[in-house]
Structure formats: C-alpha cells, structure tokens
Amino acid sequence: MDDLTVVVLAAGEGKRMRSRQPKVLHELCGRPLIAYPLRIARTLADTIIVVAPPDQEALRAAAGDGVTVVEQRERLGTGHAVLQARDACGAGAILVLPGDVPLLSVETIDRLVKHHAARGAAATILTAVVDRPQGYGRVLRQGGRVIRIVEDRDATDDEKKVAEINTSVYCFDARRLWTALAEVRPNNDQGEYYLTDAIGLIARAGGRIEAVAVEDPVDALGVNDRKQLATLAAVQRARILERHMLGGVTILDPATTYIDDTVTIGTDTVIHPNVIIDVASEIGGDCVIGAGCQIRATRIADRVRLLPYCVLTESVVDDDAQLGPFCHLRPKSHVGAKAKVGNFVELKKSRLGRGSKAPHLAYIGDATVGDGVNIGAGVIFVNYDGVAKYETRVGDRAFVGSNSSVVAPITIGDDAFVAAGSVITKDVPSGALAVERSPQVMKEGWVARRRARQTSPTQKKKED
Ligand code: UD1
Ligand code: CA
C-alpha cells in the first residue's frame, strides 16, 4: 500500500488493569498485546509509529526494529496521542490502530484501507454492531451518514441504545486529520482530547466519513481489564487451535489444550489433553505429545513421542526420540535422535547422543554424553560442589551402571564400563572397567545363629 502510515496507540495508563506494567505489554496467548496491531501494521505499511508512555524501554523492545516510538508525556487522551505522532507521519493516509484491540485480522484492516482509498473518504471508521455496546463509543448517523462518535460516558440514554460501536480503528486523510485535531477540545466527562471528536469535526467541515463494519464483532473487543484479557485470550486460543487442526494437527481435547500464538506444529502430530505449548516452540510432524506435557521455547523434530507429563524448557529434541513419562528437560538440553529419556530423569545443559538411553531416575547435568550410551537407573552426575558447577563427558557406547555417582569434572571414555553403585572420581579410560565398591562381606549361617540367640533368654543381649 502506497504511502500509508500506521499509528499504534499504546500510551494509555491502562488504569483498569491495575498493573505496574503498561497494558499493551500484558500477554495474550504468548504475545504482548502490542504485537497484534504491529503484526497488521508490518504487512500493510512501511511507516509505523507507536505512541508510548514515557520511559518505557520494555515497550520499545517489544515494538522491535523498524518502528518509530514517540512518547506521549502527558496522557491527555487519544486525540492528543495521535498528535504526538504528527512529525513522524507521512502525507498519505494515516491508519490508527489501538494497542488494546488484538483480535482484528489483517484482511479486515486491509478492507478498511482499500475502502477508504476507493471512496476518497476524509475518514473511514471500522465499526462493529454488538449485543452489549456498553463502554464503547457509539457511531451516530444522520440519514445513514456518520456524523460523529459519542463516548459511552458522554452519551444520552437514546445514544446509548445505538449498537454500532467505534472499534478505535480509523483511516484518515492526513490533512483533514491534523486540521481537525487542532480543533479538538477536552470538554467531555474525562477532560481528555478525544480522537473520536475529530470525526465529528471532519464531518461538520464537509468531509466524507465512511464506515466499514467488521464481519465478526468479536474481533472488535478491546482489553481494558484483566477479565476482558481472559475472555479475549479464550477466543484467540480457540482460533489458534482451529488453525492447527485445519493445518493437519490432531488435538484430542481443545478445551484443555493451550497453544501460544508463537508455536508451530507439523502435520499428523497428535496432542493429548491438558497440554501447554508456548514461547515459540516448534514441534515437528508425526509426533505424539502425551497428556499433561508442558513445552516451552523448545524445538522438537519429527516422530518424537512424549509420554505423559514431560516438562521441556529451552531444549532441543531430535527425530524419533522418546521421552517420559515424567521427565524434565531444563534449559539447554539436547536429546539426540532415537534417544530415550525415561521416567523421573532430569537433564540440564546436557547433550544425550544419538540412540543413548537414560530410562529411569537419573540426573544428567552439565554433561556431554556420546552416542549409544546407557545410563542406568539412579545415576547421578554430581556437577555441583556447593560453589561451582563442573562438566562431565561420557564417550560413545559407554555404560554407566545403576546407582553410580559420576563426580565432575570427569571424563568417561568411549566403550568404558562403570560398575553399578560406583562413586567415580577419576577419569575412566576408553574400554576400561571402573568399579568403586567396598568388598562384599559374607557370613555363612549368620541368620540361623541370630535367630537362635533371639529365642534364648541368656544370650539375648549378646551381640555377634
Ligand atoms: C476508545 C474510544 C472508543 C472506542 C474504544 C474501542 C476514544 C476517546 N474512545 O475508548 O470510542 O469504542 O476505544 O476499544 O478514543 N491511549 C493513548 N493515550 C491516551 C489515551 C489512550 O495512547 O492519552 C491509547 C491506549 O493505550 C489504548 C487506546 O489509546 O490503546 C484507546 O484508549 P482507551 O483509554 O482504552 O480508550 P477506550 O475507553 O477503550
Ligand atoms: Ca480500550
């Protein structure tokens, strides 16, 4: 679209959120609210301006590259907010998007912009006809034409009955907008400079006001408090699940499945109930994600099976691996292809090579484990001495017997064998057997002697 500027309004106090952070940084399905209008802005315009509260580094960071952030030092209303963007705006059409109306689609906004251009309008408003217009600005018409917008708190009882609301999305002819905003006065219930008043002023000056209605009024819902945030998140969540299902993912119970907006999933993957997948996780195709799994910022390749209740964070799982039930991958873990991580196994900052197995009850921390390794039940990689963390290396095809402790820093060579129950404190060369156990003591007939002592009163107190 030629010469279009998008202004995203994000400087409001968000009082109704009762929060220390700006409203537009609250997350909806894994993205801050501000990310939703910005996604639309990026597809439609080259010049993008965000009007932000002063000194909000986090908001600047969330806005990202290629966006001009202007500050609104005093929050004097939506009209005042748009004025702060004036110097950064181009001369063509200006599209205003609210920072707190996240469910709008690119298609709808594109339709608005095109309608505005085709009609040569001075301003075009995106409206919605809703069942419960309370709290929203009402679109007032005369003989079918839009003449002004009245805010809910300033509306008369008759005006309050109007079901057509202002979504806070508008397309303006730049010259008309700046002229009108210069005339806006804060004579309303809140004492603010309302952008909505610019519509009435443009109409009165003879400008043509067009209105385009959203197809689904749900798209126009805004977030002013945390109740609305939860309501909208539920709508967005259902849409995300629908997108994945239509894209070839089986979701057994959409009612209990939470997938962030940032997640990708390959076809023929099956997701069982009570699963949470978030923070830009990538799941491959033909995977099974068992009940109760929580997957965060993790990349899972194809044909991976997660048995129930696995917790995976900032990790990578290669093709055909099998995990769980009840395993924990802490950040920077990497499970190789065809590897197996079984129940009650925890990995942290560790790599488990191709085809390696840690089937039961183990802690693998700060370790690089080669291919085809067997880690027995109850093995602990002792990586911490109370002060610092140390690394363990285990070579290919090594065998670490059950209930061994491997005290880092340490290296176990290729094909080495650690006997069960050993506490390993010295490097084990390739191909060697390491046994660290006290010799087993055997006392033949001891049990019978003990029983005899226990039944004879004179011997009772004597120890063997
Ligand atoms: C606004 C509209 C209302 C519309 C509704 C749709 C006005 C006066 N009212 O009401 O007609 O039905 O949106 O959701 O415009 N903001 C600033 N600076 C300010 C004030 C607000 O940047 O000084 C930003 C907010 O961060 C928000 C947006 O503008 O993203 C809308 O402000 P908000 O206070 O939420 O307006 P509403 O009462 O929802
Ligand atoms: Ca709002």
Image (spheres, rainbow, N blue to C red):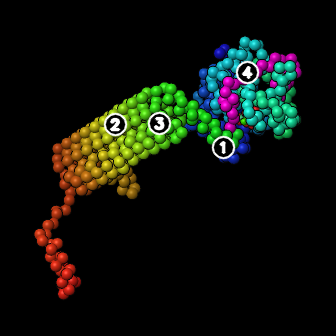
Query: Does residue 45 show up?
Result: no
How many neighbours does mark 2 have within 10 angstroms: few (below 14), some (14-19), or many (20 or more)?
A: many
Residue picked out by circle 1: 226
- Among numbered discs 2 and 4, the one appearing first in the sequence: 4
- Among numbered discs 4 and 1, the one appearing first in the sequence: 4
Task: Estimate the spatial distance between the alpha carbons at disc 1 and disc 3, rounded to whole Å.
Answer: 29 Å
How many neighbours does mark 3 have within 10 angstroms: few (below 14), some (14-19), or many (20 or more)?
A: some
Is ligand 1 within 8 Å of the beta carbon of the residue shown at mark 3? no
Q: Amino acid at mark 4?
A: Val
Do callouts 1 and 2 mark residues in contact (Cβ within 8 Å)? no
Residue picked out by circle 2: 321
How many neighbours does mark 4 have within 10 angstroms: few (below 14), some (14-19), or many (20 or more)?
A: some
- The image shows residue 285, relative to residue 438, as above or below, that is above
Q: Amino acid at mark 3?
A: Leu
Q: Which mark is residue 252?
A: 3
Q: Secondary structure at mark 2?
A: loop
Task: Estimate the spatial distance between the alpha carbons at disc 2 and disc 3, rounded to whole Å.
Answer: 22 Å
In the rendered structure, the answer to whether residue 118 lies left or right of residue 251 reads right
Residue picked out by circle 4: 212
Q: Secondary structure at mark 3?
A: loop
Do callouts 2 and 3 mark residues in contact (Cβ within 8 Å)? no
In magenta, the rendered stretch is 196-223
Task: Estimate the spatial distance between the alpha carbons at disc 4 and disc 1, rounded to whole Å.
Answer: 28 Å
Task: Estimate the spatial distance between the alpha carbons at disc 3 and disc 4, rounded to whole Å.
Answer: 38 Å
